[in-house]
Amino acid sequence: AVIYHGKVIVFPGSSLTGKSTIAAYFLKNGGKLITEDTAAIEIRDGKAFVRSSYPFIKLSKSANDELSFASSGGIVLPTEKNARMGHLLGKKSFLAKTVPIDYCFFLDYADLETIEPIKSSEALPKLLSSSLNIYPLTEIKRRELFHWSANLSRCLKIFLFRRRKGIHLSRFLADFIRSN
């Protein structure tokens, strides 16, 4: 989750979809990180809020180089399966508080860049598959997760951001955020 031009954006999804790279793009262009990897989200009065976590982001060497994100190579993470390096952020790049979410973007690779709104019914399976679960899921836990995800999908403006690989395409999303 990041804040950019006063808008809070979450990027749920699986590994290797470019979430951290897009977040780093926003940070390099005046945004702040709220959380990376795990987003603790709560719903209050029909509004979704995300809690900040820790000022740390993981990037591949190519993303770090293309963005000129950090001058150092980063912190080696021995258990990192995607060969990313950790980067500790300073106070100017991190927002340490709970804030309401404005947008939710699911990321997908495609031949052309598009941003399409998706209905909560279409977002529900995506939210469920992006949720951190404690296994094994009992019947009660499955129902609670489904109920919570359904409530969350009704609280958010949810979009699918399709794009080709490459950091420069994050500008397309940044322009959308600034204009909406």
Image (tube, rainbow, N blue to C red):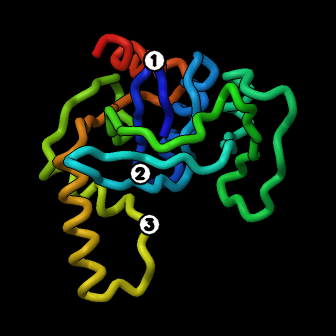
Quadrant including the C terminus? top left
Q: Earlier in the sequence, mark 2 or mark 1?
A: 1
State how many labels appear: 3
Nearer to us: label 2 or label 1: 1
Q: Which residue bears the numbered disc 2?
A: 13
Along the horizontal axis of the image, is 99 left or right of 71? left
**Percent of width and height locating residue 40:** 46, 56
Q: Earlier in the sequence, mark 1 or mark 3?
A: 1
Badge 3 marks a residue whose secondary structure is loop
Using the numbered discs, state the Cα–Cα distance from disc 2 to disc 1 in whole angstroms.
23 Å
**Percent of width and height locating residue 96:** 59, 40
Most extreme residue toward the right is 72
Badge 1 marks a residue whose secondary structure is loop
What residue appears at the point 36 percent right and 19 percent down from the top-left corner? 177
Looking at the picture, does residue 176 appear above or below residue 147?
above
Along the horizontal axis of the image, is 26 left or right of 60? left
Along the horizontal axis of the image, is 170 left or right of 84? left
Nearer to us: label 2 or label 3: 3
Closer to the camera, 54 or 175?
A: 54
**Residue type of the residue flagged with mark 1:** His
Residue 180 appears in the picture as rendered: yes
Checking the image for residue 5, the label placed there is 1
**Residue type of the residue flagged with mark 2:** Gly
Looking at the picture, does residue 92 appear above or below residue 119?
above
